[in-house]
Amino acid sequence: MHIVMFGDQHVETLGGAQVSMRLQRAFLERAGHTVTIVAPRRHGPRAHTGANDPGYLDLPSVPVTLDREYAMTWPGARAERVLDAEMATRPPVDVVHVQGDFWGAFLGLRFAERHGLPVVITMHNRVDVGIRAVAPAPGLVLRGLNRWGRHVLGETNTQGKDGWAYLRLLASRADAVTAPSAHFARRLEEHRVFEHVDIIWNGIDDDAYRAVLDKPQTERTSRRPRLVWVGRMSPEKRLLPFLEAVVASGIDVDIEVIGNGAQRAAAQRVAERAQASVYFLGSLPYRETLRRIRAADALVQTSIGFETQGMTIFEAASVGTPSIVCDPDLVAELGSGTWPVADDSVAALAEALRAATADIQRGCAPQPAADIAARFQQSSRTRAMLEVYARVIQSHAAR
């Protein structure tokens, strides 16, 4: 089977969807399938990463962030000519798997339409929440996004101007829709995005998981509790409220912040006021990130409403690390091994940090369920996705 995946960002960039797509590709290829990943070409000092990988099809792009980490491809005739010419040199395609929300989605849906191919869409993101977090006029942006999508896709039968209307527009071209959590699948169905959404968690790399568990823990130089925060440093991830809560809580702990983004300088300024020792480690390789999550006493997950799964808390649970979690949907999804935060205030997060620190020091931290690791490994997630692929291919062929 040849699966062509479309993403908004190159999978070598930072982000949960990108990590998931890399893992999906690796385990699909391990199962004997061929995968092509279509995404914008990278820019800046990391542009060479993956440049010669035959599984990547990089389209012309322009950088969209100051650090040149992220880029966009205009979903027009030029990109489609490059895409079709390159795909003509590759094996015939069996299924298109769209895993982007913007230009990646448009390019993937139009490619599938041109070539008469079945489409699976994995919805990784709450588009409305993300846009509200980063756009100065989110209502205007969402209206424009809906108009742009209808224009690019030539759609005249859908209406609406919010994030759910936009996701309905994309799903109207799909044979199946999957979501990485039960709570997001439920919301997609409630908002009539798709009648039945398949729940398929994003997974953890089986090999990385075993390697991290097999490696002995290094001796700590500090006996203070250690917390770790992992993610993109942007408003929807709520790094700044976390660090403000650290200041307000007065906890005396070591905190490792893994990731990069536009808010790094502001975060460092807040951290200077904390009693805790805060270490900004930048972006780390996947296995090193897992190793540091395992070595921590707790992971802190601060976004609310934005995450459709919350990959880091599942990674933490898989290696036995409990989490301090702000989003009640994520608390319910994980089911165990958490300190829930009462509400979205800095005060509530500060109180949860104090409670978690006290529990860690007393040796009574909550423990994640033992079966999370097996249910979360990518090999099991790939088997579930292959069942979806087979279903839509068979259904499409019967039409």
Image (cartoon, helix red, strand yellow):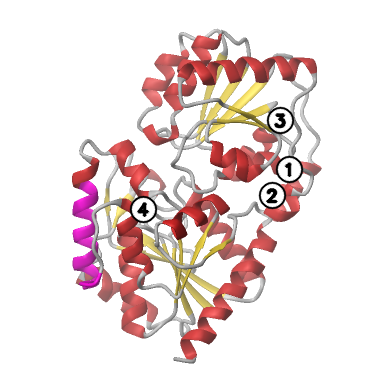
Q: Is disc 1 placed on a helix, strand or loop? A: helix
**Residue nearest the viewer, comparing 68 with 370:** 370
- Quarter of the picture holding the C terminus: bottom left
**Residue type at tag 3:** Ala
Residue for badge 3? 295
Q: What stretch is highlighted in magenta?
A: 141-157
Q: Based on the displayed image, in which of its 4 quarters is residue 389 positioned? A: bottom right
* Residue 212 badge: 1
Q: Based on the displayed image, in which of its 4 quarters is residue 364 positioned? A: top right
Image side of residue 308 versus residue 104, left or right:
right
**Residue type at tag 4:** Arg
**Residue 316 location (% of width, % of height):** 66, 39
Q: Is disc 4 placed on a helix, strand or loop? A: loop
* Residue 42 badge: 4
Say which residue appears at 37% left-offset and 21% top-offset: 266
Residue 181 seen in the current view: no
Q: In this view, does 71 lie above or below 360?
A: below
